[in-house]
Image (cartoon, grey):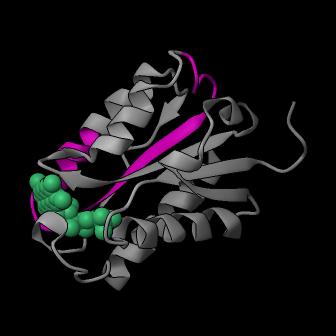
Amino acid sequence: MFGKKKRALVVYYTKTGHTLEAAEAVARGLRESRVEVDIKTVDQVDPSDLESYHIIAVGAPTWAARPARPVKRFLKGLDKKALKGKAAAPFTAYAGMRGKATLRRMRRLLRKRKAKKVLKGVAVKAGAPLSLWKGRSPSEEDVARLEELGRKLARL
Ligand SMILES: Cc1cc2nc3c(=O)[nH]c(=O)nc-3n(C[C@H](O)[C@H](O)[C@H](O)COP(=O)(O)O)c2cc1C
């Protein structure tokens, strides 16, 4: 089923663009490690596509201490064994509160779909409260953490 090169899917939802910035950083880390990467929004992914990936990174804005609803819906809609055998990690953009709570919830959802190895993930401060406007981008340090998450996923 798999070619020589590892394949990764970075799937995300964004309202004001910050989670996309985070997704691009994770993808850079993966590509540096010679992984072939697709970046898609949750709406662009057909669950049957997942089979061809070794690695899946899922990004969500934090909404009320949870992953944004479109991401929750995407993960809950997957077949119970959709992530079997895959390495997975969550990441989130949050304005200032409860990013880690979002990561915990996302990890639980990834494990429920039987991902083999689930990394703790990375929460980056970005954006504005309630996403009312385009806020600050993730800091350089946070971008570096996201890139490292991509490299770590590639090593699993
Ligand atoms: C309905 C809603 C609820 C939110 N709840 C939180 C929250 O609990 N904690 C927080 O830090 N930010 C919260 N935010 C802000 C977003 O997490 C933040 O702006 C994030 O960067 C948005 O990501 P995006 O640009 O990818 O959409 C909320 C935003 C919305 C729209």
Q: Nearer the viewer, residue 153 or 114?
A: 114
User: Is residue 96 part of the magenta span, yes or no?
Assistant: yes
Q: Nearer the viewer, residue 130 or 23?
A: 130
Quarter of the picture holding the N terminus: top right
Tell whether 124 sits left or right of 111: left
Q: Quadrant of residue 93?
A: bottom left
Kindly identify the residue that appears in the image at 9 percent across and 59 percent down: 97
Which residue in the rendered view is the most extreme toward the top? Answer: 80
Regarding residue 15, the answer to whether it shows in the image is yes
Give the vertical position of 84 relative to 27 (above or below).
Answer: above
Regarding residue 124, the answer to whether it shows in the image is no
Residue 10 screen position, x and y as percent: 56, 53
Tell whether 23 sits left or right of 66: right
Kindly identify the residue that appears in the image at 55 percent across and 59 percent down: 150
Kindly identify the residue that appears in the image at 61 percent across and 31 percent down: 47
Quarter of the picture holding the C terminus: top right
User: Is residue 3 part of the magenta span, yes or no?
Assistant: no
Q: Nearer the viewer, residue 77 or 148?
A: 77
Residue 60 screen position, x and y as percent: 35, 52
Kindly identify the residue that appears in the image at 25 percent across and 80 percent down: 134
Give the vertical position of 89 relative to 134 (above or below).
Answer: above
Q: Quadrant of residue 123?
A: bottom left
